[in-house]
Image: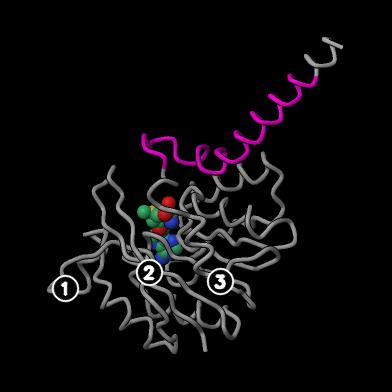
Amino acid sequence: MKFHKTILATLFLMCISASFSTASDVSRLQEPGRKLNRDEWQRPVEVMDALGVKSGHRVADIGCGFGYFTFHLAARVGAEGKVYAEDIDQKAINKVRERKEREKLSQVEPVLGESADPRLPLDLDVVLIVDTYHEFRDYDRIMQAVFRALKQGGRLAIIDAEAPSDRPRTEYHRLHSIPADLVREEITRHGFVFKESRPGFYDAEYGKKMYFLIFEKP
Ligand SMILES: C[S@@+](CC[C@H](N)C(=O)[O-])C[C@H]1O[C@@H](n2cnc3c(N)ncnc32)[C@H](O)[C@@H]1O
């Protein structure tokens, strides 16, 4: 009897520790240089909820880097969905591919894009661009490609850092930030409808204050 109780208690503890490691691994694995847990300030679950990301959805993470959002999205869309993790940096794509293979996540599709062409497939439900819009030199062509790739009613999120509005457009990539009003103006020019500005984020490690804009393809 005592033996059975010990076995049950051990199994219970194993289950608890397995569930803890599954939840935290989604975040912990991809950002080795960071000391703070990004989930605490980036609130990925709230971001995905605001965009209505669901199981089975086809989504793209443009400028995915090492895949912080890619793997959160992969957990949300599940094996029936797809996450196109796009970046122009081969090293970032390699990292995402390594993790996708290690964790056997067939729903993650790494895509090596070009600076003016994210090489997206069509019929996407959601496109996420985090801390990357300011990097685009060919923003008009990229946003035309995003517009084509999204379904009617599909959503686009831009999360980026606020910047002073009096600088020449060509300076924002160097500042690693861009004014939210300018982003709204540029994106709506391509046919997107601005839906809302959600509560933003503060990355204390890099001292970055970020906004969160949502658009829709009508
Ligand atoms: C600051 S990182 C953000 C990474 C990721 N989104 C995150 O939040 O952790 C910016 C990323 O944008 C990528 N990038 C720069 N220009 C790009 C372009 N034209 N198309 C796609 N990705 C680009 C960079 O290679 C880099 O991985």
Marks 2 and 1 in Cβ contact (< 8 Å): no
Distance from Cα at disc 3 to Cα at disc 1: 28 Å
Q: Specify whether 31 is left or right of 126.
A: left
Closest to the observer, 162 or 87: 162
Residue 96 position, x and y percent, is 56, 48
Q: Give the range drawn in magenta.
A: 8-37
Cβ atoms under marks 3 and 1 closer than 8 Å: no
The mark nearer the N terminus, 2 or 1, is 1
- Under mark 3, the amino acid is Val
Residue 107: give x, y in percent of width and height. 69, 56
The scheme the figure's colours follow is: one colour
Residue at the image position 41 percent from the left and 46 percent from the top: 40
Mark 1 C-beta closer than 8 Å to ligand 1: no
The amino acid on which the numbered mark 2 sits, given as a three-letter code, is Arg
**Residue shown at 51% from the left, 50% from the top:** 67
Q: Nearer the viewer, mark 3 or mark 2?
A: 2
Residue behind mark 3:
126
Categorize mark 3 by other alpha carbons within 10 Å: few (<14), some (14-19), many (20+).
many
Ligand 1 quadrant? bottom left
Residue positioned most to the top: 2
Residue 153 pos. (x, y %): 57, 84
Mark 3–mark 2 distance (CA, rounded to whole Å): 16 Å
Instruction: Relative to 57, say whether 201 is above or below.
Output: above
Q: Which residue is drawn at 31% across and 49% down?
A: 203
Q: In this view, does 191 lie above or below 57?
A: below
Task: Say if 37 sits above or below 52 in the image.
Answer: above
Q: Residue 66 carries which label?
A: none
Check disc 1 and report the residue beneath it. 165
Asked which secondary structure carries label 1, the reply is: loop
Left or right of residue 139, residue 105 in this image: right
- Residue wearing tag 2: 198
Q: In which quarter of the image is residue 134?
A: bottom left
